[in-house]
Image (spheres, rainbow, N blue to C red):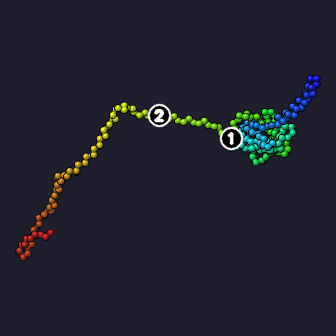
Amino acid sequence: MIAIIKRAIGPLVISLAATCSPALASSPTGLWYDHTGRGAVEITNCNGKLCVRIVWVKDANHKEGCGFQIIGDVKPVAGGKWDGGWIIDPEKDPKHKYDVEITPQGDKLKVMGYAGVKFLSETMIWTRAPASLQRCNESVARAPEPAPAPVPAPAPNRRDDNEPPTVYPPPAATPAPAPAPPPVANPDPPKQVEREAPTASVKPKKDCKIEFGGISLTFPCPD
């Protein structure tokens, strides 16, 4: 009897396994590294369809693409595949959309982009990423910087309460500068030497003599 039950249940178990395995393999949601290894995406279920957005980039200079949607409207089809949606290539033309087919393969994901017909296609293999992947839209919490240690105030000078306070004399006033002495007048001014006018030399005059009619006259010669 037991052998008969095993023979009856065996085909049913195999049939259920064959029915359930495609369903389990047809859930590509989660985190995936793309075929280049320079980025990672997250596949989520958007009202029964797949949505794919960039959530990690290896190069920190390309973080402006974080959160960018590259796949959408992909629907489940027969054979555990997803099809009928669109895909874009952000490195070429983000405005141009292609058709896409997604096939889960365990820890791999086969992503095929095509334009209308599948024999003109490009196939990419994505790899499952860990759930602990640090996403580019998550800010890393910084530890608060330690507050600077307070500077202790200088201890006041202690003295005995019975000791009288020390009284210091006021500082001596600075004496005013002595006035400058008045200028001393010169008692003996320098004497002015009077110069005598030069005396003109007097030339002696010559006598002139004229004889006329036997008379001789002598007189000073004119200059």
Is residue 115 shown to the viewer in this render? yes
Residue nearest the viewer, comparing 14 with 117: 14
Q: CA distance from mark 1 to mark 2?
A: 44 Å
SS assignment at label 1: loop
94 sits left or right of 7 in the view: left
Indicate the position of residue 169 as horizontal and vertical percent values. Answer: 30, 38
Residue nearest the viewer, comparing 72 with 195: 72
Residue nearest the viewer, comparing 15 with 63: 15
Indicate which disc residue 152 carries.
2
- Where's the C terminus, which quadrant? bottom left
Is residue 123 shown to the viewer in this render? no
Residue name at image x 43 percent, y 34 percent: 154
Residue name at image x 76 percent, y 48 percent: 95
Indicate the position of residue 114 as horizontal and vertical percent values. Answer: 82, 43
Three-letter code, disc 2: Pro
At label 2, counting other C-alpha atoms closer than 10 Å, the crowd grade (few under 14, some 14-19, many 20 or more) is few
31 sits left or right of 159 in the view: right
Mark nearest the camera among 1 and 2 is 2
Residue name at image x 51 percent, y 34 percent: 149
Indicate which disc residue 170 carries.
none
At label 1, counting other C-alpha atoms closer than 10 Å, the crowd grade (few under 14, some 14-19, many 20 or more) is few
Extreme bottom residue here? 213
163 sits left or right of 43 in the view: left
Which quadrant of the view contains residue 220? bottom left
Indicate the position of residue 53 as horizontal and vertical percent values. Answer: 74, 42
Which quadrant of the view contains residue 4? top right
Three-letter code, disc 1: Asn
Indicate the position of residue 91 as horizontal and vertical percent values. Answer: 73, 43
Indicate which disc residue 137 carries.
1
